[in-house]
Image (tube, helix red, strand yellow):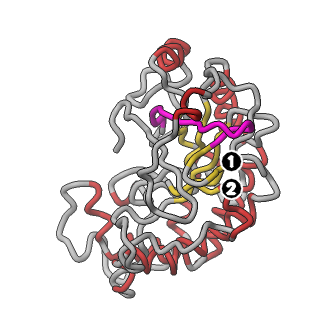
Amino acid sequence: MAPLCIVLVLLVICTAFDCSVAANDKHTKALPKRGISGPSYSVQDRWITDELGRVRIFRGCNSVQKGYPWYPQFGDSQVNVRNDTVLRLMKEWGFNVVRLGTMWSGTEPSRGQYNDTYLTVIGSVLKQMQKYGIVGLLDAHQDVMSAQYGTYDGFPKWVVKSLSPPRHPYPWPFKKIRFWAEAYATEEVGQHFQDFYDNVSGVRDAFINMWRKVAQKFNTKDYPNVLGYEIINEPWAGDVYNKPDLILPGNAGKKNLMPLYDDVMEALRNVSDQALFFYEPVTWSLHSSRPTLGTGFTRVPGGESQRNRSVLA
């Protein structure tokens, strides 16, 4: 659960997992003025660069509405980036990015039926941010998948209803959940994440189609301040009770996450070829040379040709 505002530092890497390299003087002195007028971003080495090869450092906050209507609201506890005063202050404070919740439940509340009204509101938020030189990282946010597990419907209700019956009633093997994140360790949540990765009832395909819809709508030609797409927030490893090796983060990354990211990248690469692709490992992966303890990613999603647009988030 994000606090009101967090500093977001995007440390960018392509194939290595060492983010300790600092920008040199020629890069830091050449940074352009804040403001977006349609630059093209790419990844070079460990950095996001603009169309002139200058390193861009992005600092900002989350704005994720974790419930209906799924977009930032006036008076909401999240950072309300629909408010001009908030955006003006962000610009004055040197913030230049918002990780903007672009929610699956808001985009596709019923299977195959996309909510154009919701997407129009997200588009208006991006346009408003653009006036203040703030870029948007569109984020399919989720925490423990579903409201039935004590959080909110990061996955639409129809998705969870389409998954396999739990082997044991939730919250097995616990008697109760005292803190929301503990629900990840229940068998049912792991089983349903595995169903998602295994495309049970076609829900993985639906997720990819949802992202294709979002990328078509928010391409960098019509929305030049779209920095990129963050495919899924804090993905869980999968069914660690039935496949206990998945508790090792490298195994989860290799077996479940990279195949998903490959397919999403394949769907998006020809839809919006300028936006960056942000992909996450499981949250307990380590900076390690040991394959089972690291991310499990030996390459970027989509292969070598996508190196210049892939960001390990």
Q: Which residues are magenta?
A: 49-63
Question: Secondary structure under badge 2?
Answer: helix
Q: Is residue 60 left or right of residue 48?
A: left
Local packing at callout 1 (Cα closer than 10 Å; few below 14, some 14-19, many 20+) is: many
Q: Can residue 156 be seen?
A: no
Between 312 and 234, the one lying in front of the other is 312
Q: Image point 58% across, 56% down: which residue?
A: 231
Q: Amino acid at mark 2?
A: Asn
At x 68%, y 33%, the residue is 225
Indicate the quadrant containing the N terminus: top left, top right, bottom left or bottom right: top left
Q: Main secondary structure of the magenta part?
A: loop
Front residue (pair 197, 157): 197
Q: Is residue 237 magenta?
A: no
Left or right: where 103 falls relative to 168? right
Give the CA separation, mark 2 to mark 1.
Answer: 5 Å
Residue picked out by circle 1: 42
Q: Earlier in the sequence, mark 2 or mark 1?
A: 1
Q: Position of residue 110 (x, y in %)?
A: 64, 55
Q: For the residue marked with disc 1, what is the amino acid?
A: Ser
Crowd around label 2: few <14 · some 14–19 · many ≥20 (10 Å): many
Q: Tell me where residue 230 appears, x and y as whole percent.
A: 57, 51
Query: Looking at the image, which is closer to me, 62 or 64?
Result: 62
Q: Position of residue 145 (x, y in %)?
A: 44, 60
Which residue does the image show at 36% across and 85% down from the upper left? 245
User: Residue at point 52% right, 30% down?
Assistant: 72
Q: What residue would you read off at disc 2?
A: 308
